[in-house]
Image (cartoon, rainbow, N blue to C red):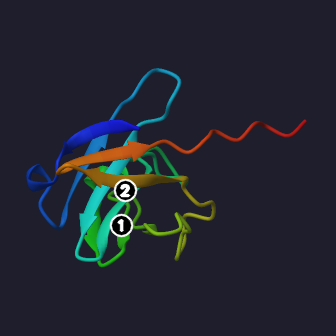
Amino acid sequence: MFAVCRIEELPVGESVRIEIDAATPAIAVFHTEDGLYAVDDLCSHQDASLSEGWIEGCYVECPLHAALFDLRTGAPTCLPARRPVRTHEVDVLDGMIHVRPAVREEAVA
């Protein structure tokens, strides 16, 4: 698990982008009224940072073409996105937000 920030440093309705290492895609962490969620930061439709998108409930709207993703599942709910973004586990331990990156799936030959 990787430390992100203290819970009070990420107010409800805000997000933060974290980079863990060169082998792991950037992750966007969102603090919604329903809790904390983390997804791959890159929109599956086109190169845009979801951490710069608009949060509404448990959804984030991509700032580039308005694709909407469910933060709970990573699934897109409207076009132009058709592929989901990967979700990651989020925990709060002693007031610190931590993210456990999902295991990257291997390409099928």
How many marks are shown on the rendered structure?
Answer: 2
Q: Is residue 9 left or right of residue 62?
A: left
Residue 38 vs residue 6, the one in the foreground? 6
Q: Is residue 65 above or below residue 96?
A: below
Q: Quadrant of the C terminus?
A: top right
Residue 83 quadrant: bottom right
Residue 1 vs residue 65, the one in the foreground? 1
Disc 1 to disc 2, C-alpha distance: 12 Å
Q: Position of residue 9 (x, y in %)?
A: 9, 50
Residue 31 vs residue 44, the one in the foreground? 31
Q: Is residue 25 left or right of residue 28?
A: right
Q: Position of residue 50 (x, y in %)?
A: 36, 53
Q: At x 53% / y 23%, what residue is drawn?
A: 23
* Residue annotated with mark 2: 64
* Res. 60 mark: 1
Q: Is residue 31 left or right of residue 83?
A: left
